[in-house]
Amino acid sequence: MKVQSKIFNIFTDIYYYKFVMIIVGFFYIFPYTMDFMGKGLKISLIWGVIVVTITYLKDKSILNNKLNWLLWGFLLLSSIGVFANYKMNFLRDLIDWCYLIVFCLSFIYIDKNKSKDFIYKEILSISYLLIFISLIVSLVSFSLYIFDFKSSVVVQGREYLFGTFENRLYGALGNPNSGALLSMISIYSSIFSLLILKQNNKKISKGITIFISFNIVLQLIVCFLSNSRSVLVSLIAGSAIIYFALCKKYITNNNIAIKIVSYTLIISIGCSALYGVSKVSNKIIGYLPTAFSYFNNEISDDSNNKKIDTIVPKDNDRIYKTNDVSNGRIGLWKADLKVAKQYIFTGVGNANVLEKVYANLLDNTGTRAANTHNVYLQILVAGGILPLLCILVYFGTILIKTFKKLFNKLYIENDMWLYCFLFSFIFALMVENIFESNIIGFMNLLTVPVFWSYLGYILDLITRKENLLTYEEYTVSNQ
């Protein structure tokens, strides 16, 4: 009976569900396993319904959280698009809505009975998993770049490119934006790991430090080579939070004018520096493919190889097919708004979004996108204005509340930096979804569990009273 009870507890523990779903989410976005894992998602939905039902029946304290009511309001209002459009793809819309409910409620949930150290262990294990997955993907992607390998595969009628095309590293995932986003997730996961290890152990082993540092550098290189502007913008937005935290810590002058100027200069210079590093990195790394070809020709006896006389950097400046700086996004957004205006209170249902949007797209000659490239407009078109307003209030409240908690309270220093980076990560993904749609829905099921899980962790941690220092403790610790 004890064994059965233990198995049941594991089966109904949301943490294990999160862990498994991150793995499932990765294989769902990996082209070669996408078909198979799509069928496995049905099993995960049934499992998720069981886990969420049992968990929320046990924990009545969640009813006291006003933020939860906003989230549930969004989930409830999202049903408008499902039932108002029951004549069009009703079953598909209903299933999508069920996924939305299960994923949001399961990934964001944190057991209040668990200690802070236990939560840290959960974050650490999830971060390790993400580092492991991303390290393999990025090593393969970087190898494709060095060897100048090019290939493609068609899955579910969509072509995925592997290698470098249009001076963008499509990598092992067959999509430069997905590859860059995974790299960004890995960078943050690496930083979370280092901060938690520092919290638990005063001295981190040199091997772990070297390994995690290597991963951060590799992920930055791969991210920059993808030339994904949406991910770069989100990285810069996230870094602005960290620069602000540094300013808050080290700029102690009470003069408002000096503070404003100092903060503006430091944040602006820091964010600009990150953009500059991306350009310098691409320039330096550009020497590697030609250097490999050069030395490969030197030691090869195959006279059919194309002779490379000098080592010059490969061009890594992104090639644009059109003069549209948004790469078709503005056209999509205009079509979104046109459809939304027609169905402002009912939406069209998630399963009907692309059909309706492309019917209203002025220039419908290009390749179809997989989504509207803006999660907020996706919500508006799918469910109408009410769920959009609810999720915006929900996200806005979280950002304001977290910001105030972080910068108006006195946190233990190691905790402070972990919370700052968690907040930075959540903010970066919210910004990134102005240009993509991958924190709600099915466009990137790896990002969905990651975003909502880390969101749950930061909301839980900043509200724990044991993290706060009294003014006297803070004064003594800084003397």
Image: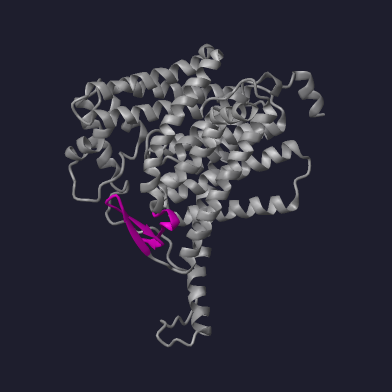
Q: Nearer the viewer, residue 155 or 208?
A: 155
290 or 262: which is nearer to us? 290
Q: How is the image coloured?
A: one colour
Quarter of the figure that contains the N terminus:
top right
Residue 143 can be seen in this image: yes
Res 478 → quadrant: top right
Q: Quadrant of residue 352?
A: top left
* In-front residue for pair 23/349: 23
Count of marks, rendered view: 0
Query: What span is in magenta?
Result: 151-174
Task: Report the residue at 48% width, 73% height from top.
Answer: 290
Q: Is residue 112 above or below residue 267?
A: above
Quadrant showing the C terminus: top right
- Residue reaching furthest to the front: 1
442 inside magenta stretch = no
- Report the side of 206 relative to 237 (left or right): right
Residue 163 is a magenta residue: yes
Q: Position of residue 293 (x, y in %)?
A: 48, 76
Q: Is residue 298 above or below residue 470?
A: below
In the displayed structure, 120 sits above or below 167; it is above
Q: Residue at x 44, y 57 (%)?
A: 171
Residue for point 44% across, 22% down = 394
- In this rendering, would 476 be left or right of 217? right
**Picture coordinates of residue 306, whole percent (x, y):** 41, 81
Position in image of residue 95 (x %, y %): 33, 30
Give the image location of residue 341, x and y in percent. Answer: 22, 26
Above or below, 69 relative to 230: above
Q: Dividing the picture into quarters, in which one does residue 334 lie?
A: top left
Residue ID at (48%, 70%): 289
Q: Is residue 232 visible?
A: no
From the viewer's perspective, tell me whether residue 474 is left or right of residue 13.
right
